Amino acid sequence: MGTYYIQNFGCRAAQSDGAALGSLLGRDGMVPAPESRAADLVVLNTCTVTAAADDDVRQTLRRVRRENPGARILVTGCYAQRAPEELAAMPGVVWVVGNTHKGRIPEIIARTKSEARTGGEIHIGDAIGQREFLAAPVEEAAGDRTRPNLKIQDGCSNRCSFCIIPFVRGRSRSMAADEVVAQVRDLAGKYREVVLSGVNLGRWGREPSSKVRLADLLRRLLRETEVERLRLSSVEPMDWSDALLELAAGSPRIAKHVHAPMQSGSDEVLRRMRRKYRSRHYAHRIRKARRLMPGAAIGADVMVGFPGETDEEFEESRGFIESLPITYLHVFTYSARPGTPAAVAGEQVPMGVRKERNRVLRELAAAKNLEFRKGFLGRRLSVVTLGQERRALSGNYIQVELARPRPANEIVEVEVDGITSRGMRENRCVCWAAPDGGARGKRRE
């Protein structure tokens, strides 16, 4: 029996893959180690969405090799799928396993061990033809995780000009509805909130043989499970259908949280990105979400410095963002990905300009988020408690500092009366009625 340690990089989908891989290794007789330096096998489950993500993997690989020279290192995930030879050449790497072969990792390890092979084996196939769906709930990725993430969709059939993901994860494919229901039912017995995620979540159920859509699945989950709160991760703007928005607005068991990637507010940039909507379409979805859910968190991903982005196009995007009821942004600086059309496009924006535009949008996002939070001063929020460090997260995605420690994994209502650097603070003043029915009193927690 050996020990393993899995380090996940990147998105929720990668975390879910890592959780599933841990289950496979456990079934094969291995046990988890508390840290990489104590493991016989170290698995780096990689991301490759940006150059910085690649750098992070390489730095981690060198550190693992330095701290645990006897470990067998296996590199898998999106970077492994994109550039297997590059990773196989790095000292200490025994296996490079693409996304296409992740489910076979225990078999690959066992076979190599029995044949006493060493060094740089590559196991990779054609991701575009990938049909396997590997997933498990992420329940312990963080020490205080009380909001398990369940990946129910993988891959992407879009072809945005900047994105490498379709080439390393394959076409869109969905977890079967019955399996989603079974997984959520199981999680609902242990957790108050479950997060549904995917590489392109809004495409759940869109296979040619399927007639059900994401809204249909949510209705079934509400009907057939006892989950107290469902939260959707990122959903493409045009997949926020009327049916999905109305269901989210009408059910108290669905978090009032809409995340819709924007990428740019300039139609010309969106065209060069090969996005399937224009700014007017995006604005219509976002404003409808706000009308239906006045207190909802509304977030967006935005990219700055896309090839050819002029000062005028950036200002158009900035003004568009400012005009919308967005409450937070994830701002990304464009990073060329080998193999994508954008990587060989002319007129690359200087890095200094990209970083300045990033700063401008982050400051705009901070101002909009502060304004959003101020609107809840003196009001009550439904929050899920995250641990013993007085932290919680509201249904509308506000971090709340609790007045006192509470057990993790509870949904409670709290009154918030203060603003913190990143969220809000629970009212520390507790009021009560006098036993004789007299005047109410107050005390500080």
Image: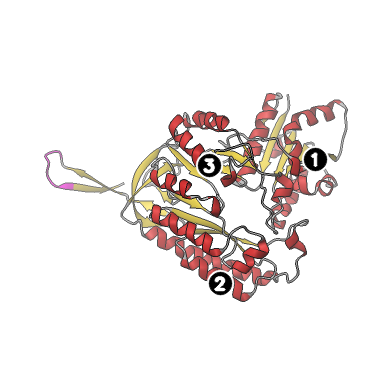
- Residues drawn in magenta: 435-440
Inspect this view and state whether residue 379 appears: yes
Which residue lies at the image location 38% right of the left edge and 42% below the top edge?
A: 252
Asked if 48 appears above or below 127 in the picture, the reply is: below
Asked which secondary structure carries label 3, the reply is helix
N-terminal label among 1 and 3: 1
Label 2: few (<14), some or many (≥20) within 10 Å? some
Chief secondary structure of the magenta span? loop
Point out residue 326 in the picture as x, y percentages from the top left corner: 47, 60
In the picture, measured across the screen, residue 259 lies left or right of residue 95, that is: left
| In-image side of 303 versus 148 (left or right) | right
Residue carrying label 1: 125
Secondary structure of residue under mark 2: helix
User: Tag 2: residue type?
Assistant: Glu
Q: Estimate the x, y position of residue 417 in percent, counting from the top left.
A: 33, 55
Whole-angstrom CA distance, mark 1 to mark 3, is 30 Å
Which circle marks residue 214 in the picture? Answer: 3
Residue 297 at what x, y percent from top left? 45, 54
Distance between the Cα atoms at labels 3 and 2?
Answer: 33 Å
436 is within the stretch colored magenta: yes
Name the kind of residue labelled 1 in the image. Answer: Gly
Disc 1 secondary structure class:
loop
Please say if 245 is above or below 131. below
* Lower position in the chain sequence, tag 3 or tag 2: 3
- Classify 10 Å Cα crowding around label 1: few (below 14), some (14-19), many (20 and above): some
Quadrant of the image containing the N terminus: top right
Q: Quadrant of residue 92?
A: top right
- The numbered dot on residue 316 is 2
- The colour scheme applied to this rendered structure is secondary structure
Q: Amino acid under label 3?
A: Leu
Residue at the image position 75 percent from the left and 60 percent from the top: 341
Q: Are marks 1 and 2 in contact (CB under 8 Å)?
A: no
